[in-house]
Amino acid sequence: MKSEKTKIKEIKTLKELRSDLTQNLIDINGNIVSLKNCIESNEIIIHHIENNLPYNDSLNFHFSRLYPYIALSVNQTTYESLKQTGFNLIFNDSFRISISDIYANQVSFYRNLESSYLEEHHNNYIKPMFMSGFITFEYLTSIQPKNFDEFVQNDQINV
C-alpha cells in the first residue's frame, strides 16, 4: 500500500509529465505545420514548372518555404528524473510502460528519422540547391532563384 507522501509525489510527477508531453506536442504540431507549408509550396512550384509558367516574384515566398527548419526538441526532464529515482513511483503498470515507450522508443524513432532522412535530405539536396541556385533576400520569407529558367532546366530537379 502506498503512503500518502508517495501518492502526492506520484500525482506531482504525473502532472509534470503531462506538462512535458503537452510542450512536446506543441513542438510536434509546429513541425507538422512547417512540413505542410513546405508540401503546399512545393506543389505550387511544381505546378508552375510543369505548366511552363513564367517566373513570378510571388514564387519567392514559396521557395522560402522549401527550406523548413524542424527539429524535435523533447522536454524529458521528468522522464529523466523518473529514470534516476525509479519508475516504481508510478503505480499503474500500463501507464508506466506507455511512458517508457514514448520516451525510449517513439522519441528515439522520430530522432533517428529526423537525422537520417531530414538532415540527409537537407544536406544532400536542399542546401546545395539553395547555395548554388538562389539569392536570399529575407530568410524564410523571400528567396529568389538566381535564374529561374536555369533552375527549371536543372537536371537535379526531378519534377
Image (tube, rainbow, N blue to C red):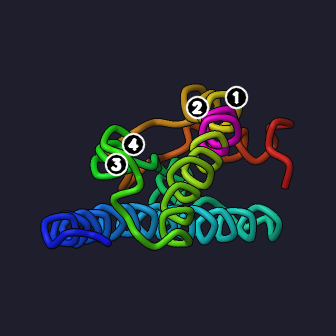
Query: Which is nearer the N-term, disc 2 or disc 3?
Result: 3
Residues shaded magenta: 113-120
Mark 1 crowd level (few <14, some 14–19, many ≥20, 10 Å Cα): few
Mark 4 in CB contact with mark 3 (< 8 angstroms): yes
For label 1, the residue is: 124
Mark 2 crowd level (few <14, some 14–19, many ≥20, 10 Å Cα): some
Magenta span contains residue 28: no
Q: Which amino acid does label 4 sit on?
A: Lys
Q: Is residue 56 visible to us here? A: no
Q: Does 50 sit left or right of 72 as displayed?
A: right
x 41%, y 53%: residue: 87
x 30%, y 61%: residue: 20
Q: In which quarter of the image is residue 116?
A: top right
- Count every numbered label the image shows and give the total: 4
For label 2, the residue is: 127
Q: What residue type is labelled 3?
A: Leu
